Amino acid sequence: MDRDLTELSAHHALCVHGFRGMGYSEGFVASLAAIVARLRDEPGVRVRVRVGSDAVCRACPSLAVGGCMRYGQSVVRQDARVADVLGVRSGDEMPWDDLRARVVDRVSPGDLGDLCGGCPWLGYGVCAEGIARARAGLPLHGATGA
Ligand code: SF4
């Protein structure tokens, strides 16, 4: 893979806004923290959208040869749904700023209940707060805050 591209599952384009350091394993948290820091701190960073697992998922103990053992096909359907809302397709490459702008324009905090049903982090409210921060023009929070 192109080292200059950050691979991002479509639904992770939402998760990065609310990420506060929670996750499924130390490896998952470290991987997502690194990606959030890169998106936040590297001007002009580019992303490749995935409908399916990305580098964060590959650091998760639930990913197996057959796919995600925790959520199965539901997480792929979630990716497809989020990609549809954002108007992107798997394999699309663009600056993170462009994908971020699509999230800001097309996703409101109240949409997460519908887009993220079943996610254990939804109830904490940090993701809705993160989308609200993005819509207010604030940078990604990250694991330990800006
Ligand atoms: S609720 Fe879950 S899937 Fe939705 S943005 Fe938050 S962490 Fe991601």
Image (tube, grey):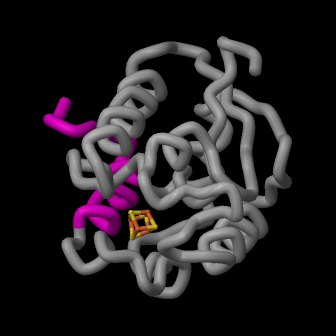
Q: Residue at x 75, y 16 (%)?
A: 2
The residue at the far left in this view is 144
Residue placed most toward the observer, 118 or 111 = 118
Q: Residue at x 55, y 56 (%)?
A: 63
| The N terminus - image quarter | top right
Is residue 26 left or right of 17 when viewed as pictured? left
Q: Nearer the viewer, residue 121 or 101?
A: 121
**Measuring 57% from the left and 37% from the top, which residue is drawn there?**
55
115 left or right of 144?
right
Q: Which residues are magenta?
A: 126-146
Residue 142 relative to residue 97: left or right: left
Furthest toward the front, the residue is: 65
Answer above or below: position of 29 versus 72.
Answer: above
- Quarter of the image holding residue 26? top left
Question: Whole-percent x and y of residue 5?
Answer: 68, 22
Ligand 1 quarter of the rendering: bottom left
Residue 126 lies, in percent from the top left, at 24, 63
Q: Is residue 91 left or right of residue 33?
A: right
Q: Residue at x 75, y 69 (%)?
A: 80
Q: How many marks?
A: 0
Q: Would residue 128 be visible to someone looking at this image? A: yes
Decide whether residue 46 is among the magenta residues. Answer: no
> Which quadrant of the rendered structure holds the C terminus?
top left
